[in-house]
Amino acid sequence: MDNQYQENFENKLEADINIEPKDWMPDAYRKNLIRQIGQHAHSEVIGMLPEANWLTRAPTLRRKAILLAKIQDEAGHGLYLYSAAETLGCSRQDIYQKMLDGKMKYSSIFNYPTLNWADVGVIGWLVDGAAIVNQVALCRASYGPYARAMVKICKEESFHQRQGYEAVTVLANGTPQQQAMLQDAINRFWWPVLMMFGPNDSDSPHSAQSMAWKIKRFSNDELRQKFVDNTVPQVEALGMTIPDPDLQWDESIGHYRFGEIDWEEFYQVIKGEGICNYERVEAKRKAWEDGAWVREGAMAYSQKQQAIQAA
Ligand code: ACO
């Protein structure tokens, strides 16, 4: 009987028909999706913190309103993704607790500090820009609820990317101090952004299986290359430079070649030893604990309403 289910599952993958929550799926497929979607959800909500650091110091009311809206969008993305993960049978509370306990990861990029205002523009432009390259591919992931969540998220990320580019354009055309601030932000974020795509394909334990299951449609290295090819002309248009002496256009392959990523730094960050790992997780733990009275109140209210209705 299981063979029949397995065959149906594989036929669907072959025909590019989405797998839906009530469909049979192999346990390993389910577990892998909970891992990836859960990490993705955690990244969205942890990702609110570095930008929130600048909310009270945004240079104008307009920038502050935009930043506030963007951070709220990220919370919404987290909610879509936690809901998508729940359709696989896990509990949101359980995977959130695993993140707080260091048993589930979130994106390495959010463990770097935001030191100046230009960092906020660079996060919108480069971090959300990298996220889009990765997530457009996920709009065709084989698991229906994940793929559908990605469509809406990509539309919003695309707006975030454009507002980030607009913000950095103002700095690039500003005073020498503003230009220096932008260059400093690019210098600090460039390599961590390239790390967002994950280890090289040869060192990526999940890639082969995730590609076979059509969760991933492109490999980590393919997406990283696409991002570099898209972004170098944008950096040049701003009159800025990329902190990579090995970066050069290779006419023979039609791509930019770039230097080696510091993988030691990457593994340190994902092990929990990056500059801000402790601070990020503690901020979330505090918010969760401080919010206990709200959850208790909401639960008591809902029980009261149910009792009234039942009476
Ligand atoms: N940050 C933290 N952990 C990472 C990163 C990263 N940038 N890249 C890879 N890893 C982890 C993987 O989660 C995996 O760890 P695990 O086995 O403990 O789960 C390990 O490193 C090995 O990596 P891969 O085998 O390449 O893992 P995977 O196939 O999951 O590919 C990738 C990694 C590309 C990040 C994939 O999970 C993905 O596409 N996720 C969805 C997108 C996402 O999460 N984006 C978050 C940032 S964007 C944003 O929030 C705005």
Image (cartoon, rainbow, N blue to C red):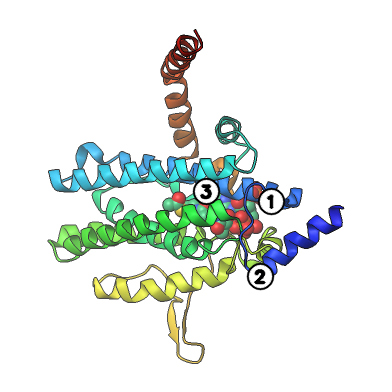
Nearer to the camera, 302 or 135: 302
- Mark 2 or 3, nearer chain start: 2
Q: Residue furthest top?
A: 311
Q: Ligand 1 closer than 8 Å to the CB at disc 3?
A: yes
Nearer to the camera, 240 or 39: 39
Left or right: 162 in relation to 282: left
* Residue type at the position of mark 1: Asp
Quadrant for residue 75, please give it.
top left
Q: Residue at x 57, y 30 (%)?
A: 97
- Mark 2 or 1, nearer chain start: 2
- In three-dimensional space, the C-alpha distance between marks 2 and 1, rounded to whole angstroms, equals 15 Å
* Residue type at the position of mark 2: Ala
Question: Tag 2's secondary structure?
Answer: loop
- In three-dimensional space, the C-alpha distance between marks 3 and 1, rounded to whole angstroms, equals 23 Å
- Mark 3 or 1, nearer chain start: 1
Would residue 180 be seen by someone viewing this image from the given angle?
A: no
Q: Ligand 1 closer than 8 Å to the CB at disc 2?
A: no
Left or right: 9 in relation to 188: right
- In three-dimensional space, the C-alpha distance between marks 2 and 3, rounded to whole angstroms, equals 26 Å
Residue 286 in picture, x, y percent from top left: 44, 24
Q: Which residue is mark 1?
A: 23
Nearer to the camera, 148 or 63: 148
Q: Which mark is residue 40?
A: 3
Q: Which residue is mark 2?
A: 15
